[in-house]
Image (cartoon, rainbow, N blue to C red):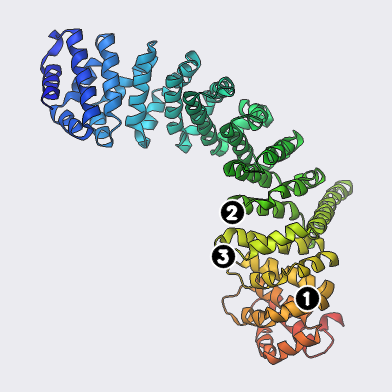
Amino acid sequence: MESLNLHLEHLKFGGGDAKEDQIIESLSGILQALTENKHTTCSLLIESDVLRTLARLLQSDPLCAVKAAQVLAEIAKNEEMKIPCIDAGLVPILIPLLDSRDQEMLLHVGRAIGRICYDNNDLQEQLVREEVISFLVRIMSDYPDNEPLVRVNLLALSNLADLDTLKLQLVEAGIQEAVAEILKRLQESSKPEDMCSLKAASDLIVSLLLGDESMQQLFAEGKGAIYQNIGIWLTSKHTQLQLTGALAIANFARNDSNCVRMVQLGVVHQLLDLLEHHVENGDVSVQHAALSALRNLAIPVANKVQMLDEGVAKRIQMLLRSDMPPVQFKLLGTLRMLMDGQDPTYLLLAYLLLASWKEPLLRCFIMTGILVVAFCCSDAAEELGQDLMLLHRLVQWCDSKDHAGVCGEANRLLASLIRHSRSQEVVKAIQEAGAMKHLVCMATSEHAIMQNEALIALAIASAINLEIIKEEFKEASLVQNIHKLLQDESTGPEVKYNSIGLLCSLLNSGDLRQEAEGDEIKETLEKLCGHINENVAKQALMALHILNGEQSLFEQ
């Protein structure tokens, strides 16, 4: 450390009389000391107040300035040096140096600014006010072959893109065109240093897409630079670019109109081709991202028919053999989203709404569209609901104890298959697969939405063919579970209503009726006749009449 002290004293007291080679030698000595003992060197640098000397050198002779910038970039690697660098007023001095034409200077200055300002919102916003974004974009455009310099600028821009207030400004500065060009240039390379830049550029794109306004501007009705390159990225030899393409689609698909446009442009088959490429020993992140994109694309009702017609539900079943829970979870969610078109309840509401519209042709057109979606989802549910491989995997995943998300989605898909198919064949196939017990368990879930889905599915199955499933209901104590839901004060009105509806179907079986009578469910129903919710009260009254063997008041 003695030689370091000599170098520090020389820089501090040498003043303007020191020769250029002496200054550079002392700066090199500091770099060597940082390599040998970072912690002790940083302490000595703070004590010597050498940072103010560096500030002066940055504005002096070009050779000394470049070396001073290099020293500062190394100093700024250390967390404890960030505040002293800020206090020494180094950031405002560094910013104008980004206008330099010396590539080595740009490299060191970029590193220094990036490290000092990392995770500091105030300083990052100051950089934007000083128009640093335009400097960084220009540097990448002017020196595209300087990989270290490009990578430093990409990392600096990514740090700025982490601030939601700045994403739109980055897009408005045209950063996407520069990044797209970088990726185009690197897509055939396999050099390790190029892969670092490719990763940095990809991360920057994904970060920009996380902002709603910046995402929408980047999409530009499918004409933006990012979207125009997605097809190339999805078929790239680089997994990183494939992932970027899938994540870009998933983020663009946060907007329904974007979803419709992308399906029209044929993006679905590009995603399916990518998934097929990764079926055997594929990349889990890519599979997860591609399934997320497909799920988002399936949300708008208008897309469901086209996606089902194009065989999406069948093609993604290739991933049923996956052992990776994240992939399993997204696969199940995507299949369920494709099934969830329009329940009869929603059809009725839509009909009532449309009936109030004055234009008869428009009413007819919209209602026809809704019915087409419902029937299409029904056909798909009937086909999938009889797929033995799918049902086998669903039963396996319903038993999963380690991954609650996979278990929950498997149960919800089972319920969806029954709700949307309303098919005797599907009910029989699910019963033969041993899956009914899982729906009974789902009815007692802690999540109301899952309870209601299970209760409705069980009621539909009971109405279709109670005889073939009543034994499983008895083994799973369905009647007793329903009674507990009705007795529980914390059970919501909708769950109570659907529970009673299911009970009414079960009472058509002599064995299950005996269980209900033996469990003294009648007293609970009598109490519910006075429930504050009118629908629950009416449902309880109807169930009482059925339990007593009387004709329902609603049937008279």
Residue type, mark 1 in image:
Ile
Q: Are marks 3 and 2 in contact (CB under 8 Å)?
A: no
| Residue 358 x/y as whole percent | 85, 50
Q: Which residue is mark 1?
A: 469
Q: How many marks?
A: 3
Give the residue pinned by disc 2. Answer: 325
Image-based side of 163 in relation to 498, left or right: left
Residue nearest the observer in this picture, 427 or 489: 427
- Residue 366: give its label: none
Query: Residue at (61%, 62%) from the top-left corner?
Result: 407
Which of 425 and 192 lies nearest the eye of the viewer?
192
Which badge, 2 or 1, comes first in the chain's sequence? 2
Q: Quadrant of the N terminus?
A: top left
**Amino acid beneath label 3:** Lys
Question: Gap between marks 3 and 2, in whole Å?
Answer: 12 Å
Q: Nearer the viewer, residue 109 or 33?
A: 33
Q: Are marks 2 and 1 in contact (CB under 8 Å)?
A: no
How many residues crowd around disc 1 within 10 Å: few (fewer than 14), some, or many (20 or more)?
many
- Write down the quadrant of residue 276 in the picture: top right
Q: Residues within 10 Å of mark 3 (few under 14, many from 20)?
A: few
Q: Residue 297 at x, y = what percent?
A: 69, 44
| CB atoms of marks 3 and 1 within 8 Å | no
Residue marked by disc 3: 401
Q: Earlier in the sequence, mark 3 or mark 1?
A: 3
Element under label 1?
A: helix
**Figure check: 128 above or below 439:** above
Q: Amino acid at mark 2?
A: Pro
Q: Residue at x 58, y 51 (%)?
A: 326
